[in-house]
Image (cartoon, rainbow, N blue to C red):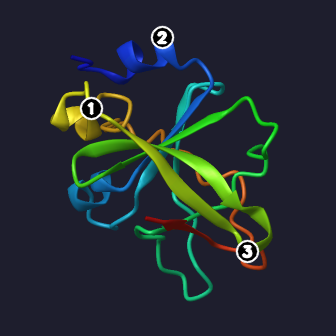
Amino acid sequence: MINTIEEFVKDHPKAVIVNYDIAERNDEGYGLTYRKSRDHTEIFRTDRLGKYLKYPYIQQYTELTDKSYVELFIIHNRKMYELELLDPDNHLFKIKRAITNINPELYMDDKFMDTRGNNRKPSSNHKDEPIWKIEE
């Protein structure tokens, strides 16, 4: 059983982990994305109305193409899933598989529970960029 993000990224060193569940743990209602390559978390971007993205919507990850080496995962309803690109022209991802060997409390890992306020604003929060969707 994987109990921490650090344990998980040993097997997935190019992981991007999008945590929807952490939004219920902060007053502003934002989710967090952990990027192993940068070893920090980012606050979700907002939509055109200034609201933080909620599942099944996801911000654009420009480095994710069909030739990408980055692995995209989400934490939603205390479960983890790996995503894959479904239709880049229509801004769609799909769930590739469930990750079943993780602790359901992983969404509260220290990487996401940084109380020092070190979560960065999203690397791209451009209102003109499309918002992607996860198809189930």
Q: Look at the picture and state if 91 lies above or below 103.
A: below
Which is in the foreground here, disc 3 or disc 2?
A: 3
Kind of residue at disc 2: Lys
Q: Residue furthest bottom?
A: 49
Place of residue 83 in the rendered image (x, y in percent of width and height, measured from the top left) = 53, 47
Q: Look at the picture and state if 37 lies above or below 129.
A: above
| Residue occupying the point 78% across, 44% down | 66
Task: Name the secondary structure under disc 2.
Answer: helix
Which is in the foreground here, disc 2 or disc 1?
A: 1
| Residue occupying the point 37% across, 13% down | 7
Q: Which residue is mark 1?
A: 100
* Residue count near mark 2 (Cα–Cα under 10 Å), binned few <14, some 14–19, many ≥20: few
Task: Name the secondary structure under disc 1.
Answer: loop
Residue 13 appears left or right of 8:
right
Place of residue 5 in the rendered image (x, y in percent of width and height, measured from the top left) = 37, 24
Place of residue 31 in the rendered image (x, y in percent of width and height, measured from the top left) = 40, 57
Q: Earlier in the sequence, mark 3 or mark 1?
A: 3
Q: Nearer the viewer, residue 39 or 121?
A: 39
Residue 135 appears left or right of 129:
left
Kind of residue at disc 3: Asn
Q: Which residue is mark 2?
A: 10
Q: Earlier in the sequence, mark 2 or mark 1?
A: 2
* Residue count near mark 1 (Cα–Cα under 10 Å), binned few <14, some 14–19, many ≥20: few
Place of residue 135 in the rendered image (x, y in percent of width and height, measured from the top left) = 50, 67
Quadrant placement of the N terminus? top left
| Residue occupying the point 25% across, 24% down | 101
Kind of residue at disc 1: Thr
* Residue count near mark 3 (Cα–Cα under 10 Å), binned few <14, some 14–19, many ≥20: few
Q: Earlier in the sequence, mark 3 or mark 2?
A: 2
